[in-house]
Image (spheres, rainbow, N blue to C red):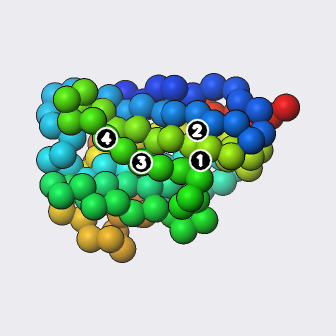
Amino acid sequence: VQLQASGGGLVQPGGSLRLSCAATGSTLSMYATAWFRQAPGAEREFVAGFKRGNGGTTYARSLKGRFTISRDAAQNTMYLQMSSLQPEDTAVYSCAASPKGLITSSMPLPTSYEYWGQGTQVTVSS
């Protein structure tokens, strides 16, 4: 599977943004998929993800409520809706996929994923 993330940009504090992760070469529901982000000088951080098949979701506890993950089977695309954005949300956001049936505790680990998109920059600033 190939992943293409898009939708990043510059947004003011308190604003919203929707990121897209378009998949080609295979069907997204056959993979566990996730969004990660990485701020300058920081480690890659799990944001949210879907389990393979039934689409059960997992969120980073600190982000749940502001960020919502969804996917469109017809478009073979995963989305990340972000609201009430703050400067600390500034990062490169990437999507990832794994053909394995990941358990919940494995989903936040970057090493669980074999396929990565190129990332899209989100900058929250006034």
The total number of labels drawn is: 4
Cα distance between the residues tagged 4 and 3 = 7 Å
First-in-chain label (3 vs 1): 1
Q: Which residue is mark 3?
A: 69
Numbered tag placed on residue 92 in the rendering: 2
> What distance separates the C-alpha of mark 1 from that of mark 4?
22 Å
Residue 104 in sight here: yes
> Disc 3 versus disc 1: distance between alpha carbons?
18 Å
Find out whether the residues at labels 2 and 1 contact each other: C-beta distance under 8 Å: yes
Which x, y percent locates residue 21?
A: 37, 33
Q: Which residue is mark 4?
A: 71
Q: Which mark is residue 16?
A: none
The reply to whether dot 2 and dot 3 touch (C-beta < 8 Å) is no
Q: Position of residue 58 (x, y in %)?
A: 39, 63
Three-letter code, disc 1: Gln
Does 2 sit above or below residue 107? above
Query: Element at badge 4?
Result: strand
Sequence order check, earlier mark of 2 and 3? 3
Tags 4 and 3 touching, CB below 8 Å: yes
Q: Nearer the viewer, mark 3 or mark 1?
A: 3
Q: CA distance from mark 2 to mark 1?
A: 5 Å
Tag of residue 38: 1
In space, the residues marked 2 and 3 are separated at their CA atoms by 17 Å
Q: Report the amino acid beneath label 2.
A: Val
For the point 18% across and 58% down, the residue is: 54
Q: Amino acid at mark 3?
A: Ile
Which quadrant: the C terminus?
Answer: top right
